[in-house]
Amino acid sequence: MKRIIVSSLVVVFGLIVIVGGISKLGDSTARCGGRIMSSGDECVTTSTTGSETSRKSADEQQKSDQFSNWVVMGVGALMVVFGTKSLVKGIRNRRKTPDADATVAIAPHVPAWPQPQPGQAPGWNQQQPHPQQPQQPGWGPPPQR
């Protein structure tokens, strides 16, 4: 059951990522750190130490954003494919076993009462030990005095 729930969530999240990516495909604005860039602006990326790591123009940044958008949509598509595969496998496994969490133990058939031996009248036989009791010293009829 856990597999079915997790797989369903992966598929739904993958679909959300794809829809979000499609909605951004038509966006032609370049953004740098969340701010909209205009023609002639440069996006400067710095490391944690403060040194400059890259410098991109507005056109370069727009192409980079579009490429990142396609990568995100590809990841969303992979999530949908593998999530669907896992979901189908989980549903098939669930159908094979009636209750995946239940454990079934089959006990051997043991008669509740001692059975008469061939040629013996049915009824209580005090001389015959119960079938579930092992033949050990001390078991059986009391000694004759």
Image (cartoon, rainbow, N blue to C red):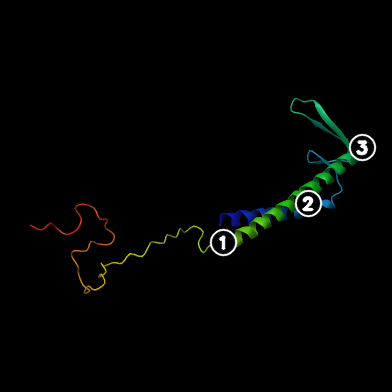
- SS of the residue under disc 1: helix
**Where in the figure is residue 118, as x and y percent of width and height?**
26, 72
Residue 23 placed where, x, y %? Answer: 79, 54
Question: Alpha carbon of mark 2 to alpha carbon of mark 1: how far?
Answer: 34 Å
Which residue has dot 1 on it?
Answer: 94
Q: Quadrant of the C terminus?
A: bottom left
Q: Is residue 145 above or below residue 111?
A: above
- Between 109 and 129, the one nearer to me in the picture: 129
Q: Secondary structure at mark 3?
A: loop
- Mark 2 and mark 1 lie on one chain; the one further toward the N terminus is 2
User: Hey, what amino acid is under mark 3?
Assistant: Gly
Residue 69 appears at what percent x and percent y?
80, 47
- For label 3, the residue is 40
CA neighbours of label 1 inside 10 A, class few (<14), some (14 to 19), many (20+): some
Q: Which of the labelled discs sits on residue 21, or is there none? A: 2
Which mark is first along the chain, 2 or 3? 2
Classed neighbour count for the residue bearing mark 2: other residues with Cα under 10 Å, few (<14), some (14–19), many (≥20): many
Q: Residue at x 77, y 47 (%)?
A: 72
Real-space Cα separation, disc 1 to disc 3, in angstroms:
60 Å
